[in-house]
Image: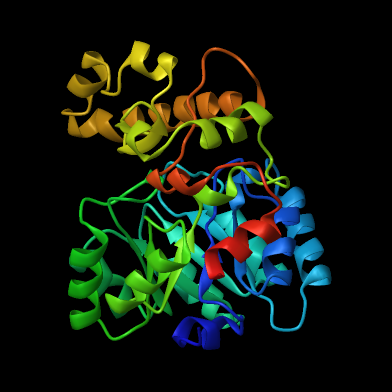
Amino acid sequence: MATELTALLKIKHPIIMAPMFLVSNTKMVIEAMNSGIAGCIPALNYRTLEELRAAARVLKAAKPEGGSFGFNLIVNKSNVKYKAQLATLCEEGCDFIITSLGSPEETIKQAHKVGIKVFCDVVDLKFAKKVEGLHADAIIAVNNEAGGHRGPQSPETLLRELSSECHIPIISAGGVGCKSDIEQMLSYGAVGVSVGSPFIASHEASVTEEYKQACVDYGAHDIVVTERISGTPCTVINTPYVQKIGTTSPWIETLLNKNKKLKKWVKMIRFSIGMKATKNAAQKATYKTVWVAGPSIEYTKEILPTKTIVERLIH
């Protein structure tokens, strides 16, 4: 499958292993690169800049000829580490950066100075045109089948609109669990896909066996949208605990969000609380589980090596 994405990243197959909070790690990305696809890790998976720097060096040393790796940056005010993370990645180098939840202007400016490509998450045409105007190298079109933070539109509607109006490559994010899904996204106008949830149940993933097994045991119909992680709609597995706490923001939080002066601080607090809850669920086996995943776990039938999951996607 030769596309603009395979040429842009010098990879064999038009697939990026999506960055997943607390799931993605260097072992997964190395296996992804060795399997002919690109891999990406959230910078927030590393507590310190030195850990982030070390990860970039490990990936550079392990990168095969024709491999590509990147990091994901949260570029809004909720991530107080953003500017230091960007500086570190520009110093160490990587093939691409994926930006999320904010303006990518500074990231594009700094990354392009050192030859790093920048792909930007968008959920609609308005933001797609904005990042195109800022000279992003590609658009990540996040649809309503994505895991984690998703968009409001179906893959077909979003991709057809963006591909007809934008002039930079479009990568589809969400709803891909097998080869026919990839082919469908390409037929809508995408040049490649970003795939996350199918890789949660991989041997190399940095989460508990209970989280991985949940992706095997539950399916697409078990995915619900919650506001309780970051304040922004996020998809999770509908476990008994999620059913117990509900999926809407507490009334006091909703009320405070209506105050323009307090809204920013409320969102920052919610983001912090939600990330801590997600970390506990990913790394500890307790009854209080909030497991982030998308509907493409429907195709996950067993816990497998990353390499085998890639083979399933391309064959």
Q: State the scheme by which the image is colored.
A: rainbow
Front one among 20 and 315: 315
In the rendered structure, the answer to whether residue 112 lies left or right of residue 28 reads left
Eyeballing the image, is 154 above or below 277?
below
Q: x, y (%) of residue 177?
A: 46, 56
Badge count: 0
The C terminus - image quarter: bottom right
- Residue at the image position 47 percent from the left and 44 percent from the top: 297
- Residue at the image position 53 percent from the left and 58 percent from the top: 72
Q: Tell me where residue 260 sits by quadrant.
A: top left
Eyeballing the image, is 188 above or below 273?
below
Q: x, y (%) of residue 160?
A: 20, 74
In the rendered structure, the answer to whether residue 61 lies left or right of residue 130 reads right
Front one among 177 and 26: 177
Q: x, y (%) of residue 115?
A: 59, 83
In the rendered structure, the answer to whether residue 98 lies left or right of residue 164 reads right
- Residue at the image position 42 percent from the left and 33 percent from the top: 271
Q: Tell me where residue 37 sits by quadrant.
A: bottom right
In the rendered structure, the answer to whether residue 219 lies left or right of residue 19 reads left
Front one among 206 and 94: 206
- Residue at the image position 21 percent from the left and 23 percent from the top: 254
Q: x, y (%) of residue 264?
A: 31, 35
Eyeballing the image, is 234 above or below 243?
below
Eyeballing the image, is 24 above or below 229?
below
